[in-house]
Amino acid sequence: MTKRRSWLNRRLPYIYGAFIVIGFLLIDWAGYDLLLPDPAPYRYELVAEGNITSFPDLALSAPLDLGLRKFEARLDADGTPFAELYVADLGPEVPPILLDWQNRSSELALVIPTRTKDLDELVNAVRAHVPEDALMLGWWETTRQLRALAGVNILFDENFPRPLFIPPAWESELSAIESLERIFWRISKKNTANFGKFIDALSSEAELGWEILKEIAGSRRCFIVVQLSDAYKLSLTRPNLVGVGFRDFPSGGDIHDEIIQVKNWLDERDIRDYAVETFGLAKKRVYYLEDIETAKTLLVRMLPFGNFDPLTLNGLKLVANYGSYWVYELEKVKTSSE
């Protein structure tokens, strides 16, 4: 018994020390946890992975050797999915590429959905008609999709912040949402100056914008792809130069009644420059210009707003239109004067 007590007495300081260390670690962990941002109100959950043959519902002509992953965006509270998305995986060095996002909730539409059919037509046309050494310019999301699906040469191969349509109930959780988006998409702070120069071109008046595009392209043959939602994204990026708003209208009823509803809304606000985009069978989105100066910008003149006439765009030749996508070729010399 004496030997046991002696053995225990010799080791008690170490045991007490161990408890003290564990206590400090628990306190430190708890304090650190308090400093962490609260989890976002949603999460991305991996559903499946493979190649295009693994996903018959994905209506895109993806190469067989392109790795794909399907995720669901789910509410953190109960796991209810509100969107599904397909991501291209080009390896650990390349940030994930969003190929397709489809909202599954009419109340919660976090991201502008992909125009999958239009995108697939664009991809097939690019494969067939764009030379291998040509440069493809466009909004970073679109050109990254074209790089993954058609192997084109692009300048912006990073993920930058994309506009999120946050419901009012989530506004207090914006910091957690931004943290989730930054980590999941590996959002970059690199190459922002280069993409910013392209944004400068789109938000400038047509002639200056053309000069900037020529500077970006250099001696390379260059194509530019734009779509309607780019106008709204541009207004968020350059709010002092570009004013574009939108209004959603339900679809699925009598088409004549829907047209009258949209027209009345526009007339009440004296809006003349607008463009309509359909999202499936359930919704129409009307993009509209908020001021006269916006109508002079290069991007707006490349899209079907108001008195759209691409033939008057000197230095840019319209080569194709696939739904909401419009494709131009950059000409090195102006064809005429405005």
Image (tube, grey):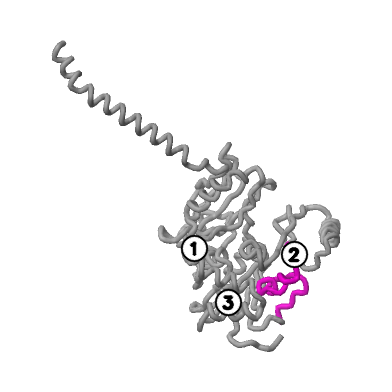
| Residue placed furthest toward the top | 1
The local secondary structure at tag 1 comes to loop
How far from the left and from the top, in percent, is residue 256?
85, 59
What's the magenta region?
Answer: 287-311
Q: CA distance from mark 2 to mark 1?
A: 30 Å
Of circles 2 and 1, the one toward us is 2
- Label 3, label 2: how many angstroms apart (C-alpha)? 28 Å
Q: In the drawing, does residue 328 fall left or right of residue 131? A: right
Q: Is residue 11 above or below residue 212?
A: above
Element on which disc 3 rests: strand
Q: Residue at x 15, y 17 (%)?
A: 6
- Tell me the residue at 73%/52% (across/down): 282
Q: Which residue is mark 3?
A: 223
Q: Quadrant location of the N terminus? A: top left
The secondary structure type at the circle numbered 2 is loop
Residue 48 x, y percent position in the rendering: 50, 49
**In percent of the image, x 54 and y 45: which residue is there?**
43
For residue 285, say whether it is visible: yes
- Say which residue label 2 marks: 290
- Residue 15 location (% of width, % of height): 25, 24
The residue type indicated by label 2 comes to Glu
Mark 2 or mark 1: name the one nearer the start of the chain: 1
Magenta segment: does it hold 300?
yes
Q: Is 64 on the left or on the right of 15, as rendered?
A: right
Q: The C terminus appears in which quarter of the rendering?
A: bottom right
| Number of other residues with Cα within 10 Å of mark 3, as a class: few under 14, some 14 to 19, many 20 or more | many
For label 1, count other residues whose C-alpha is less than 10 Å away and answer few (under 14), some (14-19) or many (20+): many
The answer to whether residue 324 shows anywhere in this view is no
Amino acid carrying label 1: it is: Glu
